[in-house]
Amino acid sequence: MKKILVIGGNGFVGGQLCKMGEEKGYQIAVADIADACVVSTYEYYKCDISDYAAILDIFQKCKPTLIVNVAAIADIDLAERKQELAYAVNVTGAENCSRAAKQIGAKYVWFSSDAIFDGAGTDYTEDIAADPVNYYGKTKALGEERVMAANENAIILRLSLVLGMPVAAGNSFLAGMLKKVQNNEKAVCPVNEVRTPVDVLTLCEAIYELDGTDFSGVMHLGSTSSVNRYDMTCYIAQLIHAQPELIVPLHEPVPGKAPRHNNGIICVAKAQSVLKTTTLLPWQKTVERAVSMINN
């Protein structure tokens, strides 16, 4: 039987990956920094991915066939403030897991970001050089180099924005927005930040499909079209019947925040050519699929 170890499995994406893995017949194991797993039935390992010896020991005990590392300091402003922590997780931890996965012969998948690009262009393909505008993007760009140097068979999925609902816990843009509008609070959304979102179900489907292939290297995963954060949020508000006046456009950068890449417009042509059973959707259908998870 195939076995998946999800590093960061207590979170939003990790939780959905575990849930889908169960449905597909995988044995499920979770590694996270917390004392316990949010799903008590899963095999669980408390870990610090910046410690190579500890990670290798966990991998050797767990014996997974597939390792997916979703652990990250993904908050751009937090990464800017706590650069040592961001480096430890996004660079050192990513490399450690990649090297240990190679040592035990497991497939390794790691998430990168469109934040490695400057955001001044459009249709970023996998071979365009990194030029990040913030420290988070720098850690992801360097993490990519380290992951592939440690393990030439690794898979790096570059993502722009993941939409959906958590299984049990974790940070989710959609869940956060839903909570705000239910409390009659305003959601302030940038007009100039364009993203190429993917719903978490499509993301998980792609990972399990890739597990059955020989693909390695970098792949962009997202919708087949892009949208700015404000228009996307207005569409979500429409779907969940929220008051439209609660969605407020932001036209200028917020003082004190780390700079953002404006155009997270990633080209997904490679993914479309590699993936045979996972269908990438236009951004509207991506949003609709994510919203459909709210009461499920």
Image (tube, grey):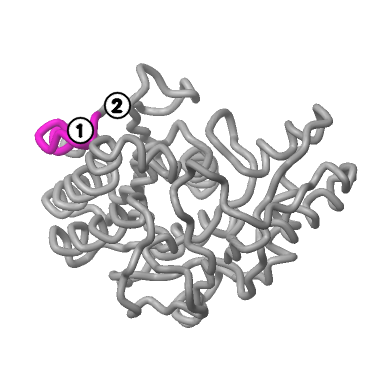
Quarter of the image for residue 196 reads bottom right
Asked whether residue 5 appears in the rendered view, the answer is yes
Which residue does the numbered mark 2 point to in the structure image?
A: 45
Which residue does the numbered mark 1 point to in the structure image?
A: 58
Q: Taking 47 as reference, is 128 left or right?
A: right
Looking at the rendering, the stretch of residues picked out in magenta corresponds to 48-57
Q: In this picture, is 131 found above or below 171?
A: below
User: For residue 30: magenta?
Assistant: no
Prevailing secondary structure class for the magenta stretch in the rendered image: helix
Q: Nearer the viewer, residue 232 or 45?
A: 232
Q: Residues within 10 Å of mark 2 (few under 14, many from 20)?
A: many
Q: CA distance from mark 2 to mark 1?
A: 7 Å
Asked whether residue 6 appears in the rendered view, the answer is no
Q: Could you tell me which secondary element the residue under label 1 belongs to?
A: helix
Where's residue 165, x and y in %?
64, 41
Q: Amino acid at mark 1?
A: Ile
Q: Taking 189 as reference, is 186 left or right?
A: right
Q: Taking 288 as reference, is 170 left or right?
A: left
User: For residue 55: magenta?
Assistant: yes
Q: Nearer the viewer, residue 227 or 188?
A: 188
Where's residue 38, x and y in %?
48, 23
